Image (cartoon, rainbow, N blue to C red):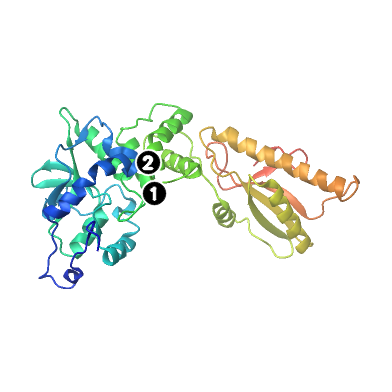
Amino acid sequence: MSNKIYDFNRKARRDDSITNTFTEDHLQIVSDNFDFIKENYADGILNEDFQHIQLREVNPEIIERDHVLFDSLNRRYQVVREGGRNPKLNEIGISLADRGYLLDEPMPVLFYNNKESYNIITGMTRDYWLGEYNFTNMVAYIFEAKDNATEDGIAQEIAELGLLLNPKTPPSAASSSADVIKYGLRACNEKWLDISNVSEGVAYDMIKQFIKRSIKSAGLGNAKWTYCTQAILNQAEDYTGSVVLPFNNDDAKDFLKENKYIDIPGKVRYLVKAYDMPHVAMIDAINLAAQFPKEEIRLVIHCGLLGADAQNTFENRMNKFWAKKNECLSSFQQVIFNGKTKDIQNFTLYGGVPQIAKNYNMMKLVKYNQLDGSLSQ
């Protein structure tokens, strides 16, 4: 195997008399690659000048695994992870068993308390598998506190690093939206980010900017960014504004079922569609109406992720969909029926699912007035 891969003894997993150990030769390979890692790992985050923590002057190091803690109670899980467990635990174990330990990939990252105490920042899963193969030590990058650092400042920067230092390449797994939400909630509830005395829009923007780097590091797109921001805002302890719910098709279908908007054979059938594809939704609804001519087809839409100005966004999307519906039907009238009036038989653009708690009853659909498209419950 390549000298950049530690082809450790796999038999140690079944035989406790066998141990594996990182040596100075392994450390040298990791050290030779450290400058490259600092520049390229997680957008160069290891080069960043933090206010409260810094890389130790000597890096990387070999650390005895008995000295590594995962929190103040010495529980071996990664606090930043949702559920404390890497969702790709088994995949990473298979990678290690098949390929060996990759010495040119990023190493676990620890925080130095003293010579016999280190807290994990990232690398919980690798530590788990090192334990499975009876490793006595690990190679790691080490952060330490700066002079005049505060406990709160250290905790905040370690929590952020726990998200940023999770690349998509082996032997790691990228952070998820659940991890980002957990981090954002902790930031709000511990007042790293104080949203208690600001407006809803300002609180939303504060959270969105706060998690921006974590979203990028996790490889999440704009939709997930908006979703995470809203989820954090809804759940933060000091948030006093209105709950705003993000919706997708499955959420909307669940809403209909839970609130007794159900199909009645021979009478009523509901169809759920997203706000952003009105023409497709109209065609699907008309096809369904043709398939079930004796049933009223009620098209219900959801408005997706609403963002900071939730009420205006919701109303604009609902109103725009109504206008697009009329535009679509007018086009049919002109092209198919040569401009002649054609009464719609068994199809109705019925309404939308409520998404803003302070403005709507969250158990009733927001209905369209069938004459002018105005909204009401």
Q: CA distance from mark 1 to mark 2?
A: 12 Å
Q: Indicate whether 289 appears above or below 230.
A: below
Name the quadrant of the C terminus.
top right
Q: Position of residue 236 (x, y in %)?
A: 38, 39
As shown in the figure, which amino acid type bears the numbered disc 2? Ser
Query: In this image, 178 relative to 287: left or right?
Result: left
Q: Position of residue 138 (x, y in %)?
A: 16, 54
Q: Which mark identifies residue 214?
A: 2
Say which element carries label 2: helix
Q: Which mark identifies residue 220?
A: none
Q: Position of residue 308 (x, y in %)?
A: 51, 33
Residue holding disc 1:
178
Mark whose residue sits in front, 1 or 2: 2
The disc, 1 or 2, on the residue closer to the chain's N-terminal end is 1
As shown in the figure, which amino acid type bears the numbered disc 1? Ala
- From the viewer's side, name the closer residue of 186 and 374: 186
Q: Position of residue 192 (x, y in %)?
A: 31, 32
Q: Quadrant of residue 187?
A: top left
What crowding class fits label 2: few (fewer than 14 Cα within 10 Å), some (14-19), or many (20 or more)?
A: many
Q: Visible in this render: residue 74?
A: no
- From the viewer's side, name the closer residue of 374 and 87: 87
Q: What residue is drawn where x is 74% and y is 64%? A: 266
Q: Quadrant of residue 101?
A: bottom left
Name the quadrant of the N terminus.
bottom left
Query: In this image, 222 relative to 126: left or right?
Result: right
Say which element carries label 1: helix
Q: Visible in this render: residue 244?
A: yes
